[in-house]
Each structure stands twice: as structure tokens, then as C-alpha cells.
Amino acid sequence: MVGVWVIVWAAAILAGCSPEPINSPYEEGALAQNTLFTAFSQRSPKYLDPASSYSTDETPFTYSIYEPLYGYHYLKRPYQLIPRTAESVISPRYYDENGNVLPDNAPGENIAVSVYDIPIRKGIQFAPHPAFARNKNGNYHYWPLQPGALENKYALTDFSEVGTRELTAHDYVYGIRRLASPRVVSPAFGVLSSHIEGLREYAQELNALEKQWEEQGKSPEWLDLREYGFNGVQALDNHTLRIRVKGKYPQFKYWLAMTFTAPVPWEADRFYHQSGMAQRNLSLNTWPAGTGPYMLETSIQNRQHVMVRNPHFRPSPYPCEGEPQDKARGLLVDCGKPTPFIDRVVFSLEKESVPLMGKFLQGYYDVPEVDGGSYGVAMQVAAGDSAEKAELYADRGLQLLSSTEPQITYLGFNWLDPVVGRGDTPEQQARNRKLRQAISIAFDWEQFVSIFLNDQGQVAQGPLPPGVPGYQPLPAGLNKHVYTWKDDRAVRRPIEQARELLAQAGYPNGRDADTGEPLILHFDSAAGMGSNATLDWMRRQLKKLNVELEIRATDYNRFQDKMRQGNAQMFMWGWVADYPDAENFLFLLYGANAKAKTGGENAANYHNPEYDDLFEQLRFLDDGPQKDRVVARMVEIVQRDMPWMFGFYPKSGGAYQAWVSNAKPTQMVRNTLQYLRVDPDQRVAGVKKWNEPRWWPLWLLLAVLLIGVWPAWRVIQRRERATALDHMKGRRGL
């Protein structure tokens, strides 16, 4: 009986005294703190070194810890550059090949070099880091390290001494020099070395130096890049950075908003290049050193990472302007308040999506994944398919937000193909163009978006997606060769017009007018299979024209080979913007970038002399009316030529708990954590409500135990009483 009463007592204690649900994955009281809880999947971020990092899952860390010169306005669309550590977003000065200053409106072909003199804000401090720590004598505490100094040190928190110093222009110089270092692998080097004056030659110099050291057997442990420089990037003083760019390249400003050009303190580079550091996984890839709003406090590979507020971060006000609907959504409530709002951000590994979403619905994650642009869309789709899920999401008050991002999925025609391509003669060119137009009318992309994307996409009218300057909303941006404007909406032209165009192209009723043979088109699929729902849908679209579609399915490697060789006829591809500029999409159709000829990104191998001439002009144009006119004309040309069926602009979005404020999904603004706010009290209440322990099974079990034990206990009691009576009788007999 004692065991039964112990169970009863324990149950009472648990039921009455547990302050948080017993299934909470966090330590007691954690949910009540000013912390944002989120997850990461697959693996820990591989590269946190700003020179090397280029993966989406790394950006929540790199853009929160490092600060490029520029960034993007959190709320405004189209996206707008704003200064981060720079005093302002500046315009360059132009010079000819003789060093003479040119006016701002000088023709781009006359400009030999663009010079950016960027003022950097004073007083910005690096987050605390052991690399800056000094002793009483002013010497660096951890340089050089004494033998055994790294014993039991596997994280930055194992170093007792830390320090800081002011950010200077020299840190940006050092960071850009590292892009060319033979000891650093950077995916941005190829592009930036083609634009920054002398960067490629600087890399060659460093490589030659490294080879010489290796031959002599005296390669230094640390390559001090302060001793080797080039004129393309200089610090004019502690707070003025000069960058010299070849010719005129207005899009260079966007590279200054990427972490490739973030500052790297030489002290940190030297600190990590000491014996024993690499063996303990201590490097810029695992423990960054930046000036951003957050710093890395905990890093347990493939388990958990924690960022905490940088105590030296200067006040950075929340924006006061945005899109018209932002005020109604409450996104301007924090106008002017200093950011960041959140003290800690905890990233926990979730290898499977089911437990991740389960914990999110329980309230244990505020956001499923900070970098995940699919959760909001997927959950909206799920809610549309299931009334039960829709009710659950509504009951939880979840914010399921989506937006059309600067990306496009298109179906391309190979310009080298004799049937759907450009054509060799003016007559053939006209016929092929009408064929492409007929196919484009027949392909009902509205239906595709409805069926396969559950309406979580926007049908494209041209190559430029929303959010990119130069994009024209309807009706101005209407593709008039495929649509008409009726009742204030775009209406796809009737299939009869497509059939008429098909006949004019030489294929009446889907047959060759000369031979009578049926028209068979070929779609090159990278899916590795010849039949699935998408391909069946495509076949049905062409069936409207009595045209057959043959699927040529291959694996992705073979597909890429066919694209490089220009052997595909029709294919589907996509593009996600590197930066929000029309040039980053229109270059996909620039003749000099033809994939089959140059290995470029023009997968359709499209070539139009007028378009190419305009693109050459576009490369030199600053934002403004002239650039807008050029972009509009280029869009008109490809709407008529139809090297692509423009397909759709996919939507992306996030899922957020009701207690998360200032959420606005975006794939372009990477430092979003700086602007989010959480209400811990609302979270605690929600988690408690959604995870109330069910005690009735335990009480039922106890009742069953008592019912089962009671007869036995009665028997034992009777025996004990009988024994006691017998004992007493025995004593009387004595």
C-alpha cells in the first residue's frame, strides 16, 4: 500500500506544482525570456566566414553578425538600398583612361574607372572577442599562444578574456583582400575580380608568393594581408573606404550589401591561424567576429546554435515607412525604436519536418526556420486542403504570410532549334514566332498555379518579377500577345486565336502544311522520368492545338550537358535574383551570355540585335526614367519574340506565432532577426494552453490499482486481525 500512496502523492505534486508543461524541450523559465526559438534542418551552417558563405541556411547568422556597408530597407518594395555602416549610399565619380574627371552623365563607354569613396560611421564597435583582448601591458592576451594554452578550449566562451575596438575602413580593405587569398575559397571572387580594379592580379601575386614559400619550405602559419595590397581597394583614412571599379557598373552597389564585402578584423584572422585552432574547429567559419546586432554565444555542431545581443551594437532605429498595407498590418508600430528587440536567438536541430512542425504547433518554435521561405506557403496550401488544419491554424492565431519574391520559373524555347527557335530566314522567323505565340496562349499558367501551387504563385507577364525596379504592374505590364485587358483583369486570349496563329505558322490543325505530318514537339525534362502530373498537364495544353509533346527525360547531369550543347528544344528553368535590379534578370536573355556558345546563363540561347544593344546601354544606366524606358522596351521585345513562356513568379513566405511582431517575409533582406519582436508572456500562456497535461489516464490507472489492491488489502487486514486475536488467546491460555 505504501507504493500506491507514493504514486498518488507524486501525481498530486506534478499536477499542482509544475510551472511549465512537462514536455517542454527547454530549461525551466526559458519560454518567459526575451528569446526567439527556431530550428535548422539537415546540418549546422558550414561557412560563417563572410568570404566563403553563400548558402541560404547560413545567412541568418552571417547577416546578423557581420555588417556590409549597405543593406536593404526592411519594409519598402521595390527593394531599396540603405546604409548600414556607411554614412550614406553614395554615387561614384567617373574618370576616363587618362585620369580626367567625367560628368555624371558621361557615356558609359567613355568611363575607364568608377571610384567609390564611402564614408564609414564613427564609433562602431566590434562584438567582444578574444582576438581583441589585451593584458595590462597592452599586449595581445592570446597572441602568441603559449604551449598548452588551448587545453580544454573548444569554443570562444572558453577564453576568459575578450576585448573590442572600433570598426575602420581598414577592416573592409582586409576583408576584400581575403577574397583573393589562396587560403580562402570564395564564390564571389570570380565576379568581383572582373569588376574591382587589380583584384585578379592581386590574387595572382598572392598565389605566386604562396607557391614560392611552399618551394622554400617556409610557408608562414598566418598570411598577413596587411603587408600585401593593391590599389583597387584602399583606406584613405580610418573612416573612408575607396574602391575602384573597372568602367561603369552601377550594379556594383548591390555587392556592397552582401557579406562578401563585410569587414574582417585582421586580429581575428591572426587569432585563428595559430597552431591547434583548426583541430579544435576554431575559425571564422565557426566563430565569426563582427559588428552586427548579434554575436554567436553557443555553437554545438549539428545540435544547437545560440546568438545573443551584441552589447556594443549601436542603436539602430526600426523603419517608419513601408508599403501602403504595412501600417494596417501593424508593421509601423515600432517606428523609430532601437533594434534589435530580441535578446537571444536559439537555433535547434530538427532532422525531420514532422517533429519540427509538431513543436511549432505546440508553440515551442516561434518561427519554424528563419531562412525557410516555404513554410508559410505550405501551411496555407494545407489549410486550403483541410478544414481541420485551417481551424487548428486559426485557433493558434498563426501568421501564415507569403509574398511574391524576385524569382521566376519559365519554360524556354531553344533559339537554335529549327522549329521553335529563331529561324534562318525572315519568313521562317515570322512563322516560328507565331508558333511560340500560339503555344504560349495554349499553356494555361493560371491553371498550373492553381493546381500545382495551390494559387501560391503569380502568373508572369514578362521576365521581371515584382520587387525589382522596372517591373510594371497590370495593366501597364500586360503581355498583349497572350492576354487582353478586360473587366480590370488580364484575360488569356481564346484558344481559337492560338489555332489561327498555328495555321499561319504552317501547322494547320497541328499538322505540317507541306507534308501533312503531325507536329511533334520535344520537352527535355531533368526529372529522370517520362510521366508525372506536370508532364501530363503539359501534354494536355498542347493537345488543345492537336500538337503532340514527346518527353525526353534524363538525369540532371545529362540534362545539363544537353543545355550546354544547345540540344534541347523546350525546357523549364528558373532564376532567383542575386540583387534586385532589372539587369540581374534581363542578362538571362543577352546574346553574349548564350549557354551553348559561351557557357553563360542565357539557357534559351536567345539573340536579338536590338535587345542586345539595349542591354549594353542598360549596363551603364543609373536608376531613373531613362533606365525605366530602356527596361520597358526590352520587356516589350521579349514579350513579342517569346524566347520564354514566362511561366510564374513563385511565392515564398513564413509561418510565425501570434506573439511574433514585425514579421514580413522576404528572401532579399537577410538581417530580418534584427526587426522581429516576441511577447514572452503571450508565448507562455499559449504553450501552457496547448500543452495542458492530461492527468485523467494517471488517475484512472490509480483507480484501477486501488480496485485491484483493495480485496487483497482486506484479506491481509483480516489475517492480521486473526493473527492478533490468536496471539492474545494464546497469552490468556498461558
Image: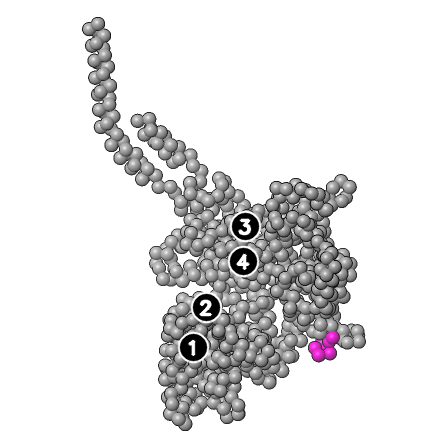
Q: Which residues are magenta?
A: 103-112
Q: Earlier in the sequence, mark 1 or mark 4?
A: 4
- For mark 3, what is the residue? 301
Q: Earlier in the sequence, mark 2 or mark 1?
A: 2
Task: Please state if 378 lies on the left or on the right of 717 as rendered.
Answer: right
- For mark 2, what is the residue? 457
Q: Is residue 433 above or below residue 42?
A: below
Q: Earlier in the sequence, mark 3 or mark 2?
A: 3
Q: Earlier in the sequence, mark 4 or mark 3?
A: 4
Characterize the local packing of mark 4: few (<14), some (14-19) or many (20 or more) Cα atoms within 10 angstroms. Answer: many
Report the quarter where the N terminus lies.
top left
**Label 3, label 1: how far apart the Cα atoms are:** 43 Å
Mark whose residue sits in front, 4 or 3: 3
**Label 4, label 3: how far apart the Cα atoms are:** 14 Å
Task: Please state if 86 lies on the left or on the right of 550 as rendered.
Answer: right
In which quarter of the view is residue 391 placed?
Answer: bottom left
Characterize the local packing of mark 2: few (<14), some (14-19) or many (20 or more) Cα atoms within 10 angstroms. Answer: many
**Residue 136 at x, y = what percent?**
76, 40
- For mark 1, what is the residue? 552
Give yes or no for residue 107 being in the magenta stretch: yes
As shown in the figure, which amino acid type bears the numbered disc 2?
Answer: Gly
Foreground of the two, 1 or 83: 1
